[in-house]
Amino acid sequence: MAGTFVKIGKASAIPDGKSKRVKVGDEDVALWNVRGKFYAIDNVCAHQHFPMLHQGILEDLTVACPMHGWTFSLETGKATVGSGKVKTYLVKIVGEDLWVESLEE
Ligand code: FES
């Protein structure tokens, strides 16, 4: 259902500057912790669709795909190197738990 949130697990499981690959419904999502704020983007790169953005290289609020170096904003999903964009998802913390918005109908 659109607008629903899926519980992912403890926020403390993802250290600052790291990410985790998570499933939100059927979607493959890269969930990043940047200085205690969490960002969720589509894990599948807009370039050649490798599901590798969770293993990307973080710089400020962008992540570089490890395959060919396209970079994406964690805030907007827009490519800052390359073109196109990846989906972004809302993230909320309730107590110690992370919840990510499901975009599925
Ligand atoms: S698949 Fe990500 S940059 Fe090519």
Image (cartoon, helix red, strand yellow):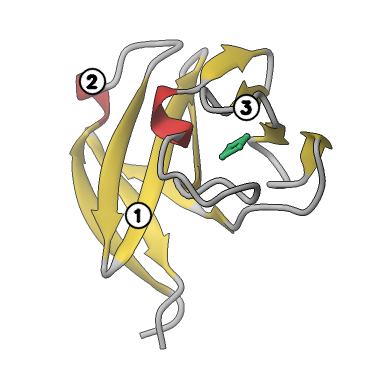
Other residues around mark 2 within 10 Å, as few (<14) / some (14–19) / many (≥20) = few
What residue do we see at 39% from left, 16% from top? 18
Label 3 to label 2, Cα distance in Å?
A: 30 Å
Q: Is residue 95 visible?
A: no
Residue 68 at x, y percent in the picture:
62, 27
Ligand 1 quadrant in view:
top right
Mark number for residue 28? 1
Which kind of residue does numbered mark 1 sit on? Asp
**Lower position in the chain sequence, tag 1 or tag 3:** 1
* Label 1 secondary element: strand
Discs 2, 1 touching: Cβ within 8 Å = no
61 lies left or right of 96 = right
Judge depth for marks 3 and 2 and give the one in front.
Answer: 3
Q: Quadrant of residue 100?
A: bottom left
Residue at 77 percent of width and 46 percent of height = 78
Front residue of 30 and 3: 30
Give the number of the disc on residue 12: 2
For disc 3, does the CB lie below 8 Å from ligand 1? yes
Density class for disc 1 (Cα within 10 Å; few <14, some 14-19, many ≥20) is: some
**Spatial distance from mark 2 to mark 1, Cα to Cα?**
21 Å
The residue type indicated by label 2 comes to Ser
Q: Point out residue 19 in the picture as x, y percentages from the top left corner.
A: 37, 25
Does the CB distance between marks 1 and 3 fall below 8 Å?
A: no
Residue 8 visible, this angle: yes
